[in-house]
Structures are given as structure tokens and as C-alpha cells.
Amino acid sequence: MEQDIEKIYRAHLETVYKYLFCLCHDKSLSEDLAQETFYIATKEIKKFRNESKIQVWLCQIAKNLWYKELRRKKKLIILSIDEEIGEIEADLDIEDNFIEEEQRIEVYKQIEELDYNMRELVYLRLTTDLTFADISQLLGKSESWARVTYYRWKTKMEKMNKDKQTYEK
């Protein structure tokens, strides 16, 4: 059993960390919450019923810990676009690398204007290896909602990029 937990930890730590980072935009807090997620998972592994993938279960634990942290702080989290841009991996490619480095700032600004569920969907899709099915389960939405919403966002970003290139010529 201990070896299984270790395998789960090694296989899913990065996904859980990236998910938490998308929620809180704080490296240190993301690391702490990721560690706490696996501590709870170790204690509760017997309760895992295989109704979802293990990474979805872990992300759900992480999400609950994040909500607990928000309640503890009792304050709204205001996301800073500057912090976000500096913290998210520099090599983050947005599906097929269609956005140049200098256009990233504009993309993050656009993401910040999305409603909460859409913003969480986009961050999860861009920063984790979760499938649309996993993301939809995590967000409590249908898989088709996740696919269509992400496709619409991606199409909008591509159109903005194309329009900007046309305008600059």
C-alpha cells in the first residue's frame, strides 16, 4: 500500500500543484496545499471508490483545501495579472503554439475577464494534463460544455491574434 501511495504521489504531484497554482497564484501556498492534499489522500485512500480517475479525486481534495484556506483567510482573492504572468511557466504553449511571447500578456488579460468556471477550465486545460472529461467532472459540468467552451475561447483568441496581425501590417 505504501508503494502505491508513493506511485500516486510521483505520478500526480505536478498536476495537483499546477491546479492549485491556477487557483491561488502563490507558489508557496500551492506547494503547501499540494503536500496537504497527498497527506489527506494517504489517510483517505480506502474511501476512494474508483468512480473517477485518481487525479480528479486528488484535485477535488486540493480544491476543498483551497476553499478551506479561503474561508480561513476570510477575504477575497484578487488576482494580479503581473504575478500570474511571472509565475506561470515561461514555456507554456497554448495549443499548437499560436501565440507569440509578447501576445501572452493580452491572453492572460482576456482569461482574467472570463467568468470563474470558464477561467478555471482554461487554466486547467493549459496547465495540467487533465482531459476534458476529467475537467468537466471536477467543475461539475458536462464534457460537451468543457469542450465547446474551450473551443470557443480558443477560436476567439485565434481570431484576436489574426486581427491584431492584420492590423499591424
Image (tube, rainbow, N blue to C red):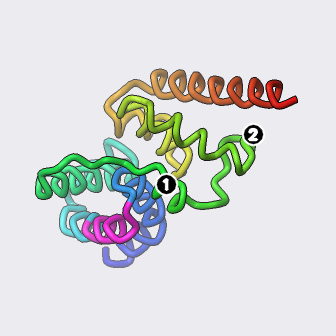
Residue nearest the observer in this picture, 53 or 34:
34
As for residue 21 lying within the magenta part, the answer is no
Q: Position of residue 154 (x, y in %)?
A: 62, 29
Q: Residue at x 47, y 45 (%)?
A: 124
Give, as a single range, the part of the protein colored magenta.
26-36
Residue under label 2, please give it. Answer: 98
In the rendered view, tell whether residue 60 sits above or below residue 1: above
Task: Please check the rendered image and state whether residue 27 is part of the magenta-colored stretch, yes or no.
Answer: yes
Could you tell whether 26 is left or right of 150 in the image?
A: left
Rounded to the nearest whole Å, what is the CA distance between mark 2 and mark 1? 22 Å
Q: Residue at x 30, y 68 (%)?
A: 38
> Left or right of 132: which side holds 95?
right
**Which residue is more in the foreground, 5 or 85?**
85
Res 31 label? none
Location of residue 57 in the rendering, given as x and y in whole percent from the top left corner: 32, 50
The percent coordinates of residue 102 (x first, y second) are 70, 48
Which residue is labeled 1 in the image? 82
